[in-house]
Image (cartoon, rainbow, N blue to C red):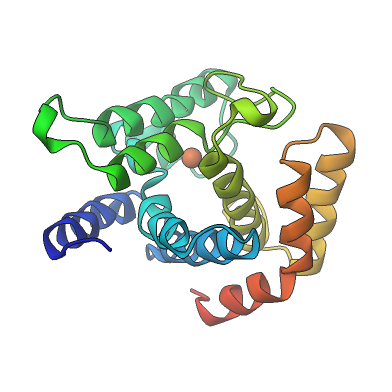
Amino acid sequence: MLNIDILENLRRLNKVAQARDEATGKHTQRIAAYCKLLTKALHLSNDFANDMFFAAPMHDIGKVGIPDNILLKPGKLTPDEFETIKFHCEIGYKILNNSGNPGAKNDIFSLAAEIALTHHEKWDGSGYPNGLRGNNIPLSGRITIIADVFDALTNGRVYKPAYSTCESVRIMRDEMSSGKAFDPDIFTIFIKNIDGFDFIKEKQRK
Ligand SMILES: [Fe+2]
């Protein structure tokens, strides 16, 4: 159980993350709910599911270090701009990881740092920033990438429409058959619980 001071710090940091989230900040709220649902569906502990709920919304906090002309660009990024965007993982890790004070170590922030660093790593090793493969990717990152991709697909951007749950699942299945972006076991559980994802999506619609 998190104490009240830690919860307050988490809420404030979440506000920072939301400030760089497009539109209303609902993305971070949906990611929290999706990650908790998926963690519970994997029969992991309630404590870990709750930690994912609080830590996962900070996955993109490193975007505070990405210039506006790239982060907010209304269109497709150039290859160079995409290389710059990739730095948000390492920036987020540096923000959330231990501050250097040996007395200040905290598991929830360590988990959030781990998620920030690894939520774009792909099962087949084609992700970033470190090209980790398979079980070398921390479990927290393997869970968060599924939530994050589902949320990106089911919400519109200036350069793409919002896809339905059904169409999003089809796109994610295609990605699994071509390159295996996601942990196959976690992806199976995600598909089995797609109604729960759809419920959260509808409940927290922008
Ligand atoms: Fe990200």
- Which of the pair 157/98 is nearer the observer? 98
Q: Residue at x 48, y 73 (%)?
A: 206
Q: Which residue is drawn at 49% across and 65% down?
A: 30
Q: Quadrant of residue 4?
A: bottom left
Instruction: Where is residue 75? Give x, y as percent.
Output: 56, 41
Can you see residue 168?
no
Can you see residue 10?
yes
- Which of the pair 65/10 is nearer the observer? 10
Q: Quadrant of residue 66?
A: top left
Instruction: Where is residue 15? Give x, y as percent.
Output: 25, 57
Q: Residue at x 34, y 30 (%)?
A: 93
Instruction: Where is residue 193? Give x, y as percent.
Output: 72, 69
Compared across the picture, whether 67 is left or right of 205 comes to left
Instruction: Decide: is 53 above or below 132.
Output: below
Q: Residue at x 10, y 33 (%)?
A: 103
Instruction: Decide: is 54 above or below 88.
Output: below
- Which of the pair 118/186 is nearer the observer? 186
Q: Quadrant of the N terminus?
A: bottom left
Compared across the picture, whether 185 is left or right of 119 comes to right
Compared across the picture, whether 96 is left or right of 5 comes to right
Instruction: Decide: is 76 above or below 19.
Output: above
